[in-house]
Image (cartoon, rainbow, N blue to C red):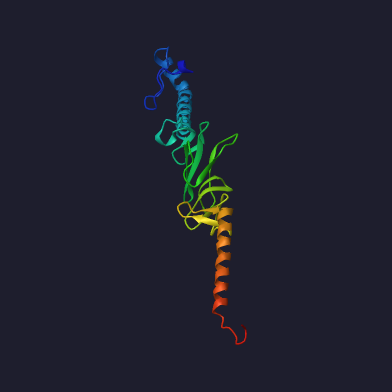
Amino acid sequence: MRNACHELSPHSGCRAVGAPGRQEHQAAQMRAPLCLLLLLAHAVDMLALHRRKKQAGTGLGANCTGCVICSDENGCSACQQRLFLFIRREGIRQYGKCVHDCPLSFFGIRGQEANRCKKCGATCESCFSQDFCIRCKKRFHLYKGKCLPACPPGTLTHQSTRECQERNPRQKSRKDRKDRKDRRQRKDRKLERRPQLPGSQ
């Protein structure tokens, strides 16, 4: 095919190699359609190659670090092994990025086909999984991996972590003993204040 045209140019046309004069002119006319087909095929190949390069990056671009498949419009859609695919949503648009660790409010799921970052529950600030929270959002209290509006009975809220901690049984029994003692003392005081009836001695 390459020998069919000495020169491929859309402006100059094709020039046949070989026969001089009139035969050269006739040969060029016969080969012109073939040269045009070659030019068209080449243009189609270059366009397809350009599209493939745009859609499937090699991870060298700034937005495609760690990617196996990347596009300008949506970022990463597949990551290298061990990395997590984090998809950031902005309205109806989403953009993928490959990360070593999932960001705050997300947790990593490892799978056979892909590793992904998934969002924690609505009341959870940081989590191990969808069902186990490590830290809660403001106004919520952490109790056994769950975020609750208030700590359940028998627990106390730790001020800095907002974590519900069960009361120490010793503390509870001391408090109960103190309450019983206070009640006895109040009862004794009431008895002392009660007026004595005549002839009760």
Nearest to the observer: residue 89 or residue 105: 105
Give above or below for 129 relative to 113. below
Give above or below for 173 relative to 57. below
Residue occupying image coordinates x 45% and y 26%: 39
- When asked about the image quadrant of residue 14, the answer is top left
- When asked about the image quadrant of residue 188, the answer is bottom right
Residue 183 location (% of width, % of height): 57, 69
| Position of the C terminus by quadrant | bottom right
Q: Which residue lies furthest to the front in this view?
A: 201
Give above or below for 150 relative to 88. below
Residue 62 location (% of width, % of height): 40, 35
Residue occupying image coordinates x 42% and y 30%: 60
Residue 122 visible to the viewer: no
Residue 53 visible to the viewer: yes
Nearest to the observer: residue 104 or residue 189: 189
Nearest to the observer: residue 78 or residue 149: 149
- When asked about the image quadrant of residue 73, the answer is top left
Nearest to the observer: residue 52 or residue 166: 166
